[in-house]
Amino acid sequence: MTARPYPTAWAAVADYLHHLGTRAVFGLPGDDMALLGELERTDTRVVLCRDQRNAVFMATGHALAAGRPGVCVVGKGPALTNALTGVLEARSAAVPLILIADGTRLDHLGTGAFQELDQLTAIRPYVKWAARADTPERLPALLETAAARAVNGTPGPVYLELAEQVVDAAVPRSGRWRSAAPQRPGPDPDALDATARRIAAARRPLLLVGGGARHRNPDGRIERLAERLGAGLFTTASGRGTVAEDHPLYCGVSGLYAVPPADALWREADLVVALGSRLEETATFGWPDGAKEQLPVVQAVVGEDGLALERPGDHVLGDAARIVAGWTELLADHRADDAWADRVRAVRAALGERAADRAERAAKAAPAGTVPVAAVLSSLDRAVPAGRVLVQENGLQDMWSYYFPHWTLGAAGGSVVPSEQTPLGFGAAAAAGVRLALPADRPVVALAGDGAFHLFRAELPSLADAGVAVLYVVLDNGGYGWLQANLDRVSGTGSRFSFTAARPTGTEGLAAAYGMGHRRVTDPGELDAALAAAWREVASGTTSVVEVAVALSDTPPGMAGAAGDFPEREGTDGG
């Protein structure tokens, strides 16, 4: 094939994004509008954001929901440093993200040029790969390399910088663009066989499904493996939405979010089969960890950089779907321990009873003028169709939704949560990207504390301009509830410092200014009608915000109180 020159570098970028099947681009470009000029001639959605960090959050949410690379475009200098928090989150969440940025002319480097920054050095610790196109001839190969690095192995963010002297130059290219589809490596047969034998020997196994298994369970093969093993089925927070939570062996989120009696299963188990999880701190919080009681783990991850080898056990590398298929075949004659499977089902039933009791007690304890968070989740479940995707934050009150079965995903439900980094405002912004990644009839709901939402709400005009319709449920405890709870633990309630205060939020006026719905709920009796009306607005194509007044004392069901990074856990008798 003869060479096909592009008139400019941005024309080449736009064509490559079309090749990738990019549905939406997020960003805040610098002064060079050439990429927007090129995208104007395509059907690619463009969300022009007010803040680069939020743009990366949106692209990350889009990638998590779509299962393909998210794309974000920013300017140079401070634009890049503003984006770094978002890139840190994408790396922690193992999200395929392509960040494209402007760069200083090479012959101006070191001269104190406008917004000059050594951007490659600044961003390399946050990404899998970073490069600069300093000649037009290099750009096509660099674009293909960026996509290949983002989606293969353990996915992650990559960075490509276009030096200023390149953007207006003609870009030569010969041949077709290469396929950018991720390659799914099969497991080594010997490692697969060894881990299958280790699994077969267990009598009380638990199956832990992490975010690395997302989009790798289209036919329910993970649930079928759990049935074959008689294994209790758990997810990490980021693994939610991978398996059906109405399955009779599913018992909730592991680690920090495992409440009695589910936490007892981790003390009774003799093996954990961890699929697509790096066994991060929150996922293993509360596991048996003494020198003589460490719980062995068979870990299955796609890349060696995801291995956590501090615990006894075995591991196998490869695609989660292919590993599960291989184990299922090798364990075709396996007979599960019926008593263990019965024990798991009994725990699931007890979790339901405990949750009902906990919600009832929270309702009785709710101060006047506030709404129990458990009631918010129940009302949301009634108001929004079952195929919804809940996009969450990780604050004090919104953590209620992490505790099963206060919030449950059926076979059709979905979930997007922040990673271990938990940057404030991620969920509120990511929900916009999730919305654009999914079919129009798939509901998207963001559950956020008021502190997180207020960091994000400068993007409300961005959502209005882009025609993005999300239901925002904002739990208002007056500010940063988690920090206030920690302060109260240290100083009591008489401190001269405060992270919360009862004051008007101002969101109603902002929502009205951008043609969005808004409701504020301070009475539990008004909740169902408010959420139902808000959902009707969202279903008709308009973002709607429902602010719900909640009490700082309404702590989630697994928590006895704040204690630094992690909470004090409720005891078995603590409810």
Image (cartoon, rainbow, N blue to C red):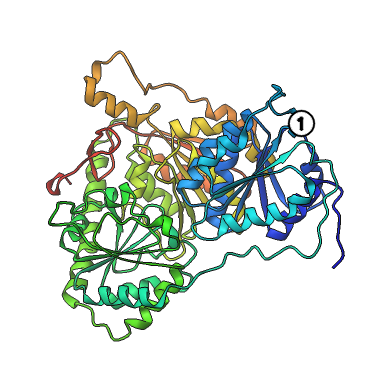
**Residue 215 % position (x, y):** 50, 64
**Residue 121 % position (x, y):** 57, 36
Q: Which residue is drawn at 52% across and 69% down?
A: 184
| In-image side of 368 versus 458 (left or right) | left
The one nearer the camera, 76 or 20, is 76
| In-image side of 210 versus 116 (left or right) | left
Q: Which residue is drawn at 42% across and 59% down?
A: 304
Mark 1 residue type: Asp
Marks counted in the figure total 1
Quarter holding residue 47: top right
Q: Residue at x 46, y 61 (%)?
A: 214
Quarter holding residue 411: bottom left
**Residue 511 % position (x, y):** 59, 33
The one nearer the camera, 332 or 484, is 332
Instruction: Note whether 355 is above or below 338 in the view shown.
Output: above
The one nearer the camera, 202 or 117, is 117
Q: Can residue 97 be seen in this view?
A: yes
Mark 1 closeness class: few <14, some 14–19, many ≥20 residues within 10 Å: few
Instruction: Note whether 308 is above or below 225 in the view shown.
Output: above
**Residue 208 % position (x, y):** 32, 62
Quadrant where the N terminus lies? bottom right
Residue at which label 1 appears: 107
Quarter holding residue 523: top left
| In-image side of 10 versus 361 (left or right) | right
Q: Which residue is drawn at 19% across and 53% down?
A: 260
Which residue, as the protein is rendered here, is positioned at the far top?
496
Secondary element at image label 1: helix
The one nearer the camera, 229 or 83, is 83
